[in-house]
Amino acid sequence: MNIRTFTERFPKDLSDHKTIVCVAKCEIDYEGRSRSQIGEGDRILLFKPDSTIIIHSPKGFKPVNWMSSPTDTTVDLSGENPVIFSERTVKPFEKIRITILDIISYSGFDSLLDRGKLDLTHTEHDMRDYLADNPHEVHRRFRLKKKEKKTKVGLIDLYGKLGDRYCIVELKSVRAGLPAVLQLKRYRDHMQEELNLDVHAILMAPSCSKNPLEILKKEGMEFKKFNLKKIKLPEPGSNLNQWL
């Protein structure tokens, strides 16, 4: 897989909570339990559906870095190389920045099950489908034009109009942190430049951390709380039946 294909596939697989196994040449900056920088090298990146992140070097059994769930992970596609940015949304504070230089191998797995425990969770894909069918829950005047609008800086979850004003909506099925706010700002700034018009930006999630909320207000963007219980999950066993 080349970098271009990665930038198209990774954000979608991430938002769909797939199990992602990526072998990549990358650089890593970490801040949290300690402060560390790891220069260019080949690493195995594992992104789990519960938002856990584990990074291994080709040798040894211990990861060179990791972050346990819940994390808020986004990818910045605006520069020469894609940058994966993750932040824990609960204490202790941690953040990690992975700059992708080359893709050696990539796989995204859907519907992996540990048969010892079936734990169904909501995904951003579930939210997109639900809100596309119920656009009034974004805003009573919101009119959807497109789901997953593709741009050179990433996929906008929902794109439409709020009255006469263009509007973009970023969705998170976990507590939103700084990466989600920065991602929404990138999308907003890009669309304003492309349209040469003011664009309204909304972040929807079950909750949002305090500092990111302040940045949203400062940037003139909006946060709207979304109750995931509104979305009906498939009956337990329906995914399992696909395997039998």
Image: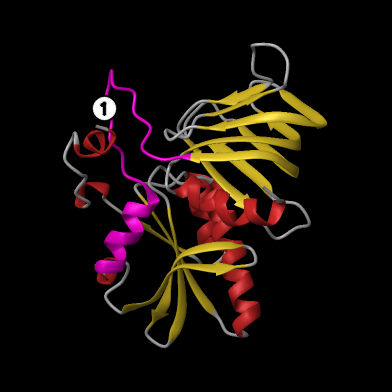
Name the residue: 22% across, 51% down. 231
Name the residue: 60% across, 24% down. 66
Query: Foreground residue, 170 or 6?
Result: 6
| Residue 170 screen position, x and y as percent | 46, 60
Which corner quadrant holds the C terminus? top left
Secondary structure under the numbered disc 1 in the rendered image = loop
Query: Foreground residue, 64 or 23?
Result: 23
| Residue 175 screen position, x and y as percent | 41, 43
Quadrant assignment, res 139: bottom left
Amino acid type assigned to the residue bearing label 1 in the image: Leu
Vertical order, 79 against 13 (above or below): below
| Residue that lies at the very extreme toward the left in this rendered image | 235
Within 10 Å of disc 1 (Cα), the crowding (few <14, some 14-19, many 20+) is: few
Q: How is the image coloured?
A: secondary structure
Name the residue: 76% across, 37% down. 26
| The residue stretch that appears in magenta | 109-133
Query: Foreground residue, 124 or 44?
Result: 44
**Which residue corresponds to mark 1?**
118
| Residue that lies at the very extreme toward the front in this rendered image | 244
Vertical order, 162 against 36 (above or below): below
| Residue that lies at the very extreme toward the top in this rendered image | 61
| Residue 219 screen position, x and y as percent | 57, 65
| Residue that lies at the very extreme toward the right in this rendered image | 39
